[in-house]
Amino acid sequence: MTVYQHILLAVDFSSQDSQVAQKARNLSLQTGARLSLIHVLDNIPMPDTPYGTVIPLDTKIPYPMLETERQKLNEIGDEFAINPDRRWLIWGEPRQEIIHIAEQEKIDLIVVGSRGRHGLALLLGSTANRVLYHAKCDVLTVRLQDD
Ligand code: AMP
């Protein structure tokens, strides 16, 4: 039995994603775990669509804005050799959807980035903190360095 069997890498499409992705990929190679990828769309309005909507990656998408997001996810997936069947683009609230997919896909390690915070941002908390607090599996937070 491996240490981890299924790792979920969460990316926010920032320039620091590759720092998180590299760690997740290395861990998956070292442990033999499968690697899945998720991005949650939380800043694109999608009227008449409930939270938690999975955006298909292999069929034509009727929203032009989503095409860019789909391309970004696929670029990361290709760069880090993540199976196309294990890439998730979901509309909703990041913490909620990351945890939902983690439970649905029987993930045993979630890998997220963590930025140093101060002031109001510290009080409001981060995605990493929220995932850490609510996840039922292990969570690795990768301290992000400025580019
Ligand atoms: P933040 O707390 O927003 O600074 O983000 C820290 C980390 O949380 C990122 O490096 C990602 O791993 C994850 N994250 C934040 N927003 C999203 C999102 N919309 N979809 C997937 N992961 C996210």
Image: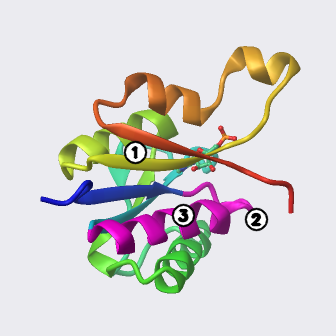
Q: In front: 36, or 45?
A: 36
Q: How is the image coloured?
A: rainbow
Q: Which residue type carries mark 2?
A: Ser
Q: Which residue type carries mark 3?
A: Lys
The percent coordinates of residue 141 (x first, y second) are: 56, 43
Q: In front: 95, or 80?
A: 80
Callout count: 3
Q: Earlier in the sequence, mark 1 or mark 3?
A: 3
Cα–Cα span, label 2 and label 1: 29 Å
Badge 2 local density, few (<14 within 10 Å), some, or many (20+)? few
Cα–Cα span, label 3 and label 2: 15 Å
Q: Which residues are magenta?
A: 11-32
Q: Which residue type carries mark 1?
A: Thr
* Rendering quarter of residue 72: bottom right
Residue bearing the label numbered 1: 49
Q: Residue at x 42, y 83 (%)?
A: 81
| Quadrant location of the C terminus in the rendered image | bottom right
- The answer to whether the residues at label 2 and label 1 have Cβ atoms under 8 Å apart is no
Residue bearing the label numbered 2: 15
- The answer to whether the residues at label 3 and label 2 have Cβ atoms under 8 Å apart is no
Whether residue 97 appears in magenta in the rendering, the answer is no
Circle on res. 71: none
Badge 1 local density, few (<14 within 10 Å), some, or many (20+)? few
Residue bearing the label numbered 3: 23
